[in-house]
Image (cartoon, helix red, strand yellow):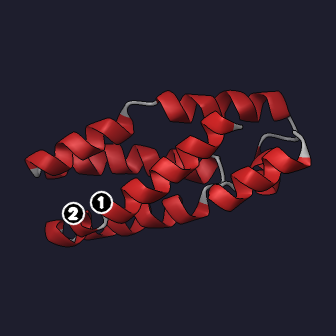
Amino acid sequence: MDKQRSEMLYESGVDVNDALARFMGNEALLEKFLLKFCSDKNYSELKDAALRRDVDGMIRTSHSLKGMCGNLSMPKLFGLFTDQLTALRSGKTEDALRLMPQISEEYDKVVKSIKKS
């Protein structure tokens, strides 16, 4: 991965060096999983569950997204999904819903950067 692409991903919220360490330096495999992240349906399902106030659906999708963000070294998104899950599991649905605009902003930024690069 060239330096420019790596920097662009880093600025959007992907710690490329950490991700590459997780993928044992295999850039092609990291690229594959970054693209899979962009096409994964969990984010759209999370938005739908949030609109319906479906707490179980939000927990399921937020948990999946948290795992993906952890594995792909997306610390800001990982932290947001961690906070959302904590709120949901504590019965603080409104707090979890209030995180959606920030989650959406960060998610869109990461996906745009992955697709652009």
* Residue 97, numbered label: 2
Q: Residue 102 vs residue 93: left or right?
A: right
Residue positioned 44% across, 46% down in the render: 65
Residue 114 versus residue 11 in the image, above or below: above
Amino acid at pointer 1:
Met
Name above or below for residue 27 compared with residue 94.
above
Disc 1 secondary structure class: helix
Q: Residues within 10 Å of mark 2 (few under 14, many from 20)?
A: some
Total numbered labels placed on residues in the image: 2
Residue 44 image offset from top left, x and y in percent: 31, 37
Q: Say which mark, if any, is on residue 100.
A: 1
Q: Identify which residue is drawn at 85% across, 41% down.
A: 24
Amino acid type at mark 2: Leu
Q: Look at the image and tell me whether residue 34 can be seen.
A: yes
Instruction: Say if mark 2 contacts mark 1, CB within 8 Å.
Output: yes
**Left or right: 59, with 26 as reference point:** left
Image quadrant where residue 84 sits: bottom left
